[in-house]
Image: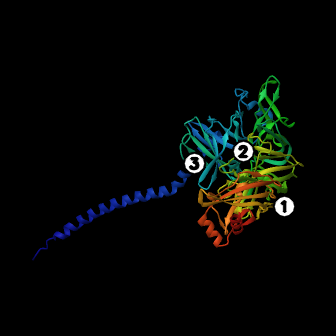
Amino acid sequence: MFALSPRKSDYEEPEELEELSIEELKELTVGFFSLLLILLSVFLAPALINYASEQVHEMIERATAQCPVANSSTSFCVMRDGKPYYFAVIGWELPSVEDLRKSIPRDYPFFAGDIRVEPPYVWLRVKTNLELEIGASEKGYAGFGELFREVLSLGMLEPIKSGDELLLPYTLPESYETMGLLKSARVLRLHFATETHLLPSEGCIGGVCFAGEGFYVNVSPPPVELKVLDLQGGYCRFEDRWHVLCLYNVTLQLEGGYLLLYFFYDEHTGAKSEAHFPVEISSYSERGGKTVFLGAPLSTVIPPLPSSATDVWEEPEHNYLAAILPPGRFTLVFRTWDAFYPETLLSCRSATVGTPWGGVDLPPQPLEVLGVTGVGVRESDGGIAVEGVNVTLRNSGTIPVPIPEAMEFYEIPPNYTLLRGFFDSTPLVLTALSGRGEYHGGLAFVINPGEVAVVPMELWRLPDRSLGVELPITALGSEHTLLIGTCSGNFTVEIPPLKPKITLVNATLHRDATRDWEVDLDVVVNVTNTWLWRVRTEWLRAYIGGRPLESLFYERPYEEIEPNASKVLRLSFTLTRDRLQEYLLNSESLSLCMGATCVSIPLCELTQASQRA
């Protein structure tokens, strides 16, 4: 009988099963704890997030409770070491006259000889606990696309402080162009500098952006306007040889700002003399989408001042500082001498006198041309030059008109052009000559409202701007036309042809035995000047057979003949026998001509008479 022995595999299999169960148990344990952590995270995360949010919200509430302003497009607040630093723009606001009086620096008195000018003021109210640097670096910029132009700056007045609020004084631009930019701007970018280093140096909070030690805030432009409502002229007169005085009453409307006028003040007499007006009041017109200026701006204001003005003194009635003009309508007296060039008033287009915010329109051609007479010419050996005319003007407007004098300009300033015209086909411009025979600073005439004046004017030839139109001797026998154009029509002045009366008195042919190759001819004529101007005897020219005889062969007197006067002239000719024989064979005559008048002398008759003698 055989006994069965156990197999090796029967003893080893349970050991392998025991080892696999341990590894699986490990894996199950790790998986169990991982699943447990995931479940805990899923169920506990919202609670943790809510807790964190509550903590942040509490911190924000605590910070907000300490910040007087919220973060917005024009304000910000930051916390540093538990302390808020904030800034907010409240808006444009005007101070009271009393607060403005106090803000004028007392250490800037107006001494005699000083010229102090400050453009109109506007004020921006801000709320802040920052130490702002109040200085010239604080500017306001108007953006045009990617470009920015400075249009505001902090003025010399002291900021007006009330608690943590400030009224910051800004001055408007003085120039017409820059004020026009401010008027057309929709948004201004204001720069503020601070003395603290606790603010961000870059980046933005809301709409406030930081850069270096300052920040920029975008605000709307100030609601300020300064318009000219009316313009009335007082009078103009020559004060002395060098100065002319013109007074204009200008009515203005100011809104949203104050004007400060710094007058010259005499402590001894207690009188204010003059002040520079801080805004350009000019005459201009719109042409082709562009503003064309037609005169110098009104700039000097003299007393009296309107009743709304307030004088400011360092001490009562001592050490005068300034005059304050509040918003409203008022009339000022301006003194000037060439504020409105006559081209403005002779133009067919209306012009405006005002500021970029608006002005009063002047009607076309308040300076009316009544007539053109008295053509002025200058005689010379070679002919004449038509250089001027007399133009009769009437001032039918309401303001006096000073007319500038153009003296030997290489290029005439455009505003000195009074009228335009043509001499035949040559274009011209006309400027005024001195009406008093003096060179006195550029003024020739003053025409007050309702007055009529005869103004001598010079003709300047275009395009080279040369004085006068030259007519050679050969052109004097023809008629010429001077045409001057005005709004009311064209004025024509005819230059008549030169037609003197020439009478032959005597003609004699002589032979000199010592000069048998030559003959002498003496001619005596009587010339009567029937022209409008003087004539010169050298204009009498000799022709043989229609061809001019060279002046080498004859002598003429050099004299002048006044209009309606006569003179007897003696001319001496020297001809060679060969040339005289040539003239005789062709039956040619000697002609003496001046302008369109000629007298003929038959050479054959003279020769026969000489032979008989």
Which is more foreground, mark 3 or mark 2?
2
Which SS class for mark 3? strand
Considering every residue shown, the one lying at the far bottom of the view is 1
Of marks 1 and 2, the one in the foreground: 1
Q: Badge 2 is on which residue? A: 91
Q: Are marks 3 and 1 in contact (CB under 8 Å)?
A: no
* Nearest the eye: 384 or 65: 384
Residue 487 visible within the image: yes
Quarter of the image with the N terminus in it: bottom left
Camera-nearest residue between 348 and 599: 599
| Residue situated in front as seen by the camera: 230 or 486 | 486
Name which residue type carries label 3: Cys
Which amino acid type is marked by label 2? Answer: Gly
Q: Residue at x 40, y 57 (%)?
A: 33
User: Which quadrant, please, contains the C terminus?
Assistant: bottom right
Say which element carries label 2: strand
For numbered disc 1, what is the local secondary structure?
loop
In terms of depth relative to the viewer, which is nearer, 277 or 50?
277
Label for residue 204?
Answer: 3
